[in-house]
Amino acid sequence: MPRPVPSGVPGEARTYYYERDFARNAVKVMPGEFFVGREDIVISTVLGSCVSACIWDRTAKVGGMNHFMLPGGQGNEAAFTDLTAASGRYGVFAMEQLINELIKHGARKSNLEAKVFGGGAVLRKFSTLNVGERNAAFVLDFLKAEGIRVISQDLMDIYPRRVAFFPASGRALCKKLTSTDSSVVTAEQQYTAKINTTEVAGDIELF
């Protein structure tokens, strides 16, 4: 049975497990991480106000997913150009990193297509900042500017989401969770606190 094949680059997801729902080996993408592969595996994540882009090259049969919390850097961080694991918290770095890694794996930018998820209004402290809405707007604007077609999306609303992406086929599944799912909210609150104190060095199917 195929297993995730890591590249060892900074920011790459390293949480591997067996996904019983799909009878496949899987890798879980946490906030600030990404993963690219072409094996018959599952790349999964859980989103609140964060956004994930699942990008696939149907010719090269390679795909990947990222998971970011904020649209872009602030202050001095906006000037950073190195794609470190820490900078994966920001959409602009997360998107560039994912696309660059796909190209390294044989994808062509002109062949890329995207499915995007997340941006739910789940964090009360962030409600006035519209973080989920900003993330959703950012990912769509970024992909449009890069000429990458968005073939499906499930963005905003008030619900957390579980997303499963199959890089060998480009298939993506999205399941909305209860809006009061404490584990998702707690995880995003913890990640928000961490990034505030850490310096930077097709169709949607429901299941």
Image (cartoon, grey):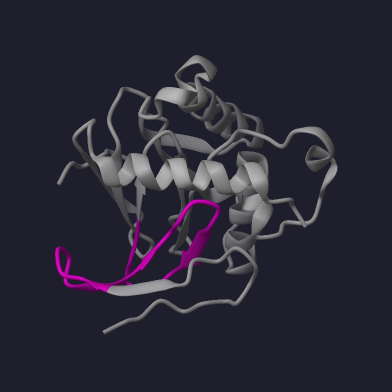
Q: In the image, is 10 to the left or to the right of 76?
A: left
User: Up-down: is 30 above or below 142?
Assistant: below
Q: In the image, which residues are magenta?
A: 18-44
Q: Is residue 32 magenta?
A: yes
Q: Residue at x 47, y 72 (%)?
A: 14
Q: Residue at x 54, y 33 (%)?
A: 139
Residue 141: percent from left, percent from top:
59, 26
Which quadrant would residue 168 be assigned to in this image?
bottom left
User: Up-down: is 156 above or below 203?
Assistant: above
Q: In the image, is 79 to the left or to the right of 141?
A: right
Q: Is residue 9 visible?
A: yes
Q: Residue furthest top?
A: 128
Residue 2: percent from left, percent from top:
32, 81
Residue 100: percent from left, percent from top:
66, 57
Identify the image quadrant of the N terminus: bottom left
Q: Nearer the viewer, residue 164 or 205?
A: 164
Q: Residue at x 47, y 58 (%)?
A: 64
User: Up-down: is 76 above or below 144?
Assistant: below
Residue 116: percent from left, percent from top:
42, 38
Which quadrant would residue 158 be assigned to in this image?
top left
